[in-house]
Image (cartoon, rainbow, N blue to C red):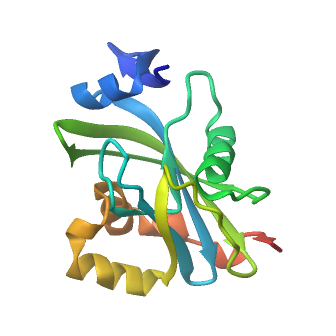
Amino acid sequence: MSEMIPTWLGGDLVAVEKLEAHRRGLRHKAVSVFVLHGEEVLIQRRALGKYHTPGLWANTCCTHPRWGEDGAACARRRLGEELGITGLTLVPRGQVEYRADVGGGLIEHEVVEVFVAQVARRIKTRPNPDEVMAVDWVSRDALMLRIANTPAAYTPWLRIYLQNHAAQIFAGVEKLPEFPA
């Protein structure tokens, strides 16, 4: 069964099949989550079976809401489906828009609702092997250095987020409510 995502066509928001939206480079809704422990961020390496950017490192969770699905509900759903994480307090960090070639003739043109969750300690994950092949906790500074040294190992959107939107995403993180986990 195909997955229908909210996509803009001619100024109207309509349901379009996810792969078609990427093939045509259509502007569509997306969700990204950053789970933080102090200065560390939980990142994931995308499974090799993903239809684009397989094996690349990304933020904690990035996905598309289903047609009619609220962004926060989507973020909670996908944290559970991808990483086995539930019960976090997600704090909205506004929207980010970007357009990037993700290989294989596919384009991500996303209007992204960004969420951040602060945890009191490194939480355990249960990665779904169909979605995620590895996870890592890394300081933001170390992540920036890794990306500078090996940019091709990271998804285009993670590079864009950190280069152009870090202040929006991480500002005031020390004041976020912590999930005790």
Image location of residue 42, percent across then percent down: 55, 72
Image location of residue 58, percent across then percent down: 41, 62
Residue visible at 30% across and 52% down in the picture = 53
User: Is the C terminus in the top left, top right, bottom left or bottom right quadrant?
Assistant: bottom right
Q: Quick check: 98 above or below 17?
A: below
Q: Is residue 88 left or right of residue 32?
A: right
Q: Quick check: 92 above or below 11?
A: below
Q: Is residue 117 left or right of residue 12?
A: right
Residue visible at 51% across and 71% down in the picture = 135
Is 81 in front, or is 29?
81
Residue visible at 46% across and 44% down in the picture = 112
Residue closest to the far right: 180
Q: Quick check: 100 above or below 15?
A: below
Residue closest to the far left: 105
Q: Is residue 91 left or right of residue 58?
A: right
Q: Is residue 25 in view from this perspective?
A: no
Image location of residue 162, percent across then percent down: 37, 68
Q: Quick check: 64 above or below 96?
A: above
Q: Is residue 170 in view from this perspective?
A: yes
Q: Is residue 133 left or right of residue 39?
A: left
Residue visible at 37% across and 48% down in the picture = 49
Image location of residue 93, percent across then percent down: 57, 55
